Image (spheres, rainbow, N blue to C red):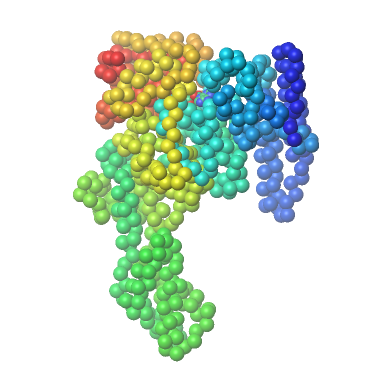
Amino acid sequence: MPATRHTQPSSPETELAAERAHLDRARAELARMREHTLSLQADGGDAIAGEALAHTLWLRARALQDDPRTTLFFGRIDTDAPETLYIGRRHVSDEGGDPVVVDWRAGVSTAFYRASPTEPMGLRRRRRFGVEAGRITAFEDEELQGAPADDRLAATGSSALLAREIERPRIGPMRDIVATIQPEQDEIVRSDVATTICVQGAPGTGKTAVGLHRAAWLLYAFRDRLARSGVLVVGPNRAFLEHVGAVLPSLGEVTVRHTTVEELAAHGTVRAHDIPEVARLKGEARMAEVLREAVWSRVRPATEALVVPRGAHRWRVPAYEVQDILDELRSRGVRYAAARAMLPQRLAHAVLVAMERAGDSPDDTVQDSVARSAAVKAYVKAVWPELTPQVVLHHVLSTGEGLADDQRVMVWDKPSRTPGRARWSVADLALLDELADVVERTPSLGHVVLDEAQDLSPMQLRAVGRRASTGSLTVLGDIAQGTTPWATGSWEESLHHLGKDLGADGVHLEVLDRGFRVPAAVIEYAARLLPHMAPGLGAPRSVRSNPGRLDVVVVGDAVAGAVEAARSASEHEGSVGVIVPDAWVGRVGDALGAAGLEHEVLDGEHAEERILPLHLVPATVAKGLEFDQVVVVEPASIAAAEPDERTGLRRLYVVLTRAVTGLTVVHADPLPAPLAAP
Ligand SMILES: Nc1ncnc2c1ncn2[C@@H]1O[C@H](COP(=O)(O)OP(=O)(O)OP(=O)(O)O)[C@@H](O)[C@H]1O
């Protein structure tokens, strides 16, 4: 059934009034839907089912809440059918069940995002609405068929409403982009659930936005499957997760967990810091083999017969027979703990065979009781000991067992006496996770969105990949923004470590190159660094119509200069990020405070509220974030804080590309050479 028949009123004013009336109607229908949900009785069969149902109803009622700050729809399509559909963040239907607003994720909404005059996809017209404070203030039409070419908004990007959305100042955390998803982004968002997509994209090309919208679309299109198996978003640090964390809830998806890779593999508390060389070695994929061997070598050879006393008899299974059992279990390809769990029954079976050989006819219960006997338990403990990841890694890092010569630098100088007291590093967490998976299979989720993936070591990639072993992944990143000593040089390699080989069925690499964040003046400046630290990778083509403002200011005192720049940046609308070398946070914070500039310090460990517009950001925390106005303080020190020149320039590239409108670079020391000279 068509949602609304559209008749063509005569003037734009009447038309606007008709659209507002449709919005009123949609709001009334939504209120009716919500009341209906609230009136449903949560009467389950038992208390637990009742509670679960009540929770589901509560979630549904919450999702049906009207947000007065926005409208229930942002677009409209008129089709050849002819029918008119309103596209919004959620589905609204009338009492008869006919759609009043269609969810942006529904199949019929695809044309809203992808239709063009050359490929109208059955649309006559696309309409976008201008919205202010929950009211429709304007609309803009694209005639997709029949109209003379000049009258058409030829390509997406030439729409004034779209441009306004892209140009808007950034305030507070990241917002959804449902009203303006671009065709190339939409293709990624709506890729099948079985597909793993890796997106390489320069700063601000919408990778994070696309990944989050893909998660929302998958949860809509494959709700049953993914509600059971789960969807996870993995990002670089807490400040980033706070920045992006509101997007999925604003799209009605409140069940998606957001985590960092360290939290994902949290088998211990991080209390030590590795030097880069050690962290790099620990992150190499060859550690997987070392650890696998470290676990399986704990299975001892059967040197003694198994002897099980029962009544007057002592039943014997010779060592070579036990060895056959051990060999068979090892060759089954199951996890260490699963094979161990099978061993008592296998041994008991061998005892039963011995009994039968002696003329006994034991019944079924005998095998179970032998399997549970003290003799079998003790034997299993001796040949196939119970293991924890911590015990095994403590052993490897204390003794160096199984390590190649060049890997021995990772052996602890002063090992702790017990695994419980070990001081684990971030890289160790990935090793512990690997071990945990050798011992016991890690359950897989339905889909994992991995952001800033270029920074993960092979071992960290394996930790993420095993959480999508039976599911799929959206892998987002930019090789030019890799700032860890183990950052990837090729997506092919990263995908391999994630367990999704490029070229295999359903694994794709996509490139996004239209920049929605950084204005042209700023991107041109930052792109000076590219040939020096990521040759072959291009800068984004900025689609911002605002060319942006770039000021490079030489000062006598960089801290005082930072305060001055922060003050003038704060005079503009929108957020301000003052990005400083990590070691300067205290100094610059004090100076901002002394100048009466109230600010929040962003920190990778903790989620910040980001209520104030002015933020003080350590350079290593800036990745993935954006601010309307950015002040970058002393680039030479930001670069010099990294272990090598390439990483230093990459860090600089990351911080210079956080600006939406204006960038001020404040320096007292000379700029790094690639930045100084065009
Ligand atoms: N289609 C779009 N319409 C409007 N805004 C968009 C669109 N795509 C992206 N943006 C905006 O552009 C900005 C940059 O997007 P995002 O942070 O996802 O980029 P990114 O590629 O992940 O960047 P980085 O590599 O720097 O982390 C965000 O403010 C996002 O909302």
Q: Position of residue 586 (x, y in %)?
A: 37, 22
When asked about the image quadrant of residue 461, the answer is: top left
Residue nearest the observer in this picture, 425 or 156: 156
When asked about the image quadrant of residue 649, the answer is: top left
Farthest residue to the left: give it: 405
For the C terminus, give its image quadrant: top left
Q: Position of residue 253 (x, y in %)?
A: 60, 37
Residue 303 versus residue 481 in the image, above or below? below
Residue at image coords 29%, 40%? 280
For the N terminus, give its image quadrant: top right
Residue at image coords 75%, 27%? 5
The number of numbered discs placed on residues in the rendered structure image is 0
Q: Position of residue 429 (x, y in %)?
A: 38, 45
Residue nearest the observer in this picture, 100 or 459: 100
Farthest residue to the bottom: give it: 359
Residue 54 versus residue 379 in the image, above or below? above
Is 240 positioned to the left or the right of 582 in the image? right
Q: Position of residue 203 (x, y in %)?
A: 42, 25
